[in-house]
Amino acid sequence: MAGNAARTAPKADPASALRFGLELVAWVATPWYFAGISWVLAVLSLVVLIGLPTVFATPGDKRAVMVAVPGWATICLVLLQLGAAVAASWAVWPAGVAVAVSVLAAVCVGTERRRWRRLLDRAGGKGFGAGASTP
């Protein structure tokens, strides 16, 4: 069913663009913050923020899924990214920038609601893509 999931993966839209922009903020601000503490923590933050969503995905939500996870796990990964973007922006950037990141993150939560509902509604509430054989 991987071919079917690739055909049904959603196309880019404004909500996806906003989410990606905030992911970029998290990828820059979080290691920036941790670099002042330890370069190991800075690298580890990138491994977590970039690696986890790359490896773990809900079938039908991304074109390529390495390890299938239920929809709630994908939602948690998005919330991790948003939380990291907000917290790290307050720690490393001027208040005006941090306020802007915080407002955009709140808007992103609103724009993600439809996607999150879809992720949670898949496969009878288990959150896996339609036709996925993963439990």
Image: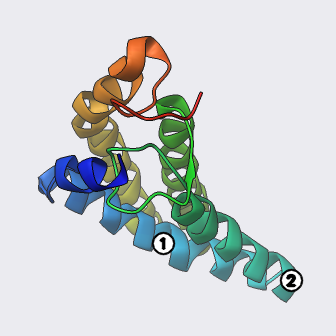
- Depth check, mark 1 against mark 2: the one in front is 2
Q: Amino acid at mark 1?
A: Pro
Against 130, is 14 above or below? below
Residue at 24% from the left image edge and 55% from the top image edge: 16
| Quarter of the figure that contains the N terminus | top left
Q: With 111 as the anchor, is 77 left or right in this view?
A: right
| Quarter of the figure that contains the C terminus | top right
In whole angstroms, how far apart are the C-alphas of marks 1 and 2? 25 Å
Label 2 sits on a secondary structure element that is helix
Residue at 13% from the left image edge and 55% from the top image edge: 14
Q: Amino acid at mark 2?
A: Val
Q: Position of residue 19 (x, y in %)?
A: 32, 56
Residue at 30% from the left image edge and 45% from the top image edge: 108
Label 1 sits on a secondary structure element that is loop
Q: Position of residue 131 (x, y in %)?
A: 36, 31
Of residue 22 and residue 135, the one placed in the foreground of this image is 135
Of residue 95 and residue 10, the one placed in the foreground of this image is 10
Quick one: label 1 or label 2, which is nearer the N terminus?
2
Question: Can you tell which quarter of the image residue 6 is in?
Answer: bottom left
Q: How is the image coloured?
A: rainbow
Against 124, is 43 above or below? below
Q: Position of residue 24 (x, y in %)?
A: 42, 73
Q: Which residue is mark 1?
A: 94
Q: Which residue is mark 2?
A: 40
Q: Residue furthest top?
A: 124
Q: Answer few, some or many: residues within 10 Å of disc 2's Cα (few below 14, many 20 plus, some between 14 and 19).
A: few
Of residue 27 and residue 8, the one placed in the foreground of this image is 8
Question: Can you tell which quarter of the image residue 101 is in?
Answer: bottom left
Question: Can you tell which quarter of the image residue 123 is in?
Answer: top left
